[in-house]
Amino acid sequence: MKNIDQRRVPLQELRRTHDPAGFEFECTDELVPLTELVGQDRALRSLQFGLGVAKAGYNIFVTGLTGTGKATAILEYIKRAVEERRQAGQISLPDDWCYVYNFDDPDRPNAIRLPPGTGRQLRDQLQELFTTVRANISRAFSSEEYEHQRRSLLEAGQDEAQAVMEEAQKQAAEASFILSFSPMGVSLLPMVGDKPMTPQQFAALTPAQRNEIQGRQQPIAKAVAEVGERLRAIEREVSQALREMDRRVAEAVMAGSFDAITALICPRHKASLSLNAGMSI
């Protein structure tokens, strides 16, 4: 027991202490993080050797305990080493290569060659552009002005279609027929008094009466076919006018949005990227 007591460490010596008065800072936020590998001289020499091997197929393997910050420290060291060599003219940074969507052939993206370091800048600007344009387009298509223009186009189409149907109804009524409009098309029904004739009533007619009705129906049936085609044409015209209006609104929102991005692109890629990105949005 006496020998154990001789080797006992006093309580006050179980930890290392430092007088705060000796610190030259008020808060650790004022300290600059270490940029060197502390206590890893052998690892540092190995890293320097590995970076000096300018041959393809060679790699640097790093291992150690998880959470010790080895990846961050080594990455920072490599960045500094590369920048120092670049400034000294010993190495030149490779160009950035970016892939952009190919609207003509989606399976073959377009490759764009950019100056070193601008690929990430292009990516960030495209993300910012997408967010901005999407918000602006949403605002434009929900505005009162857009709704007013859209409603005007729809009402004009409806008025034209209504005029066509009324004229057709007038012609049919003069021949004692009525037109029935449905999503399936336009049908022509004979009249009994002021009501459409039912299939049972038509079947109860004599052959002479049916022939007489069918004789009056033939010239009106041609007009009915023309009315149906005209109504479909009006619908196509309205749809095309709406799409054209949407295109103009989108172009107005995106006008000039790609100027900052195309400034990063090599001249031979500017036009294609601006067009593709615009169509993508």
Image (spheres, grey):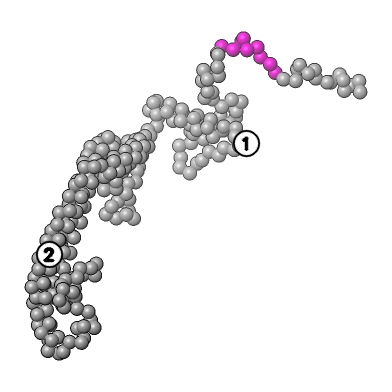
Relative side of 239 to 211, left or right: right
Relative side of 28 to 125, left or right: right
Around disc 1, counting alpha carbons within 10 Å, would you say few (fewer than 14), some (14 to 19), or many (20 or more)?
A: few
Rendering coords of residue 169 (x, y %): 12, 68
Give, as a three-letter code, the residue at label 1. Answer: Leu
Element on which disc 2 rests: helix
Residue 270 makes an appearance in the image: no
Q: Quadrant of the N terminus?
A: top right
Which residue of the protein is positioned furthest toward the top in this rendering? Answer: 21
Which residue of the protein is positioned furthest toward the right in this rendering? Answer: 1
**Dot 2 corresponds to which residue?**
166
Rendering coords of residue 58 (x, y %): 50, 41
**Dot 1 corresponds to which residue?**
65
> What predominant SS class does the magenta segment belong to?
loop
At a point 20% along the width and 87% down the height, the residue shown is 204
At a point 55% along the width and 39% down the height, the residue shown is 61
At a point 61% along the width and 25% down the height, the residue shown is 39
- 108 in the magenta segment: no
Rendering coords of residue 253 (x, y %): 24, 40
Relative side of 279 to 214, left or right: right
Residue 124's image quarter?
top left
Front position in the image: 29 or 226? 226
Question: Magenta residues?
Answer: 16-24
Relative side of 178 to 106, left or right: left
- 19 in the magenta segment: yes
Give, as a three-letter code, the residue at label 2. Answer: Glu
Rendering coords of residue 280 (x, y %): 29, 48
At a point 14% along the width and 65% down the height, the residue shown is 165
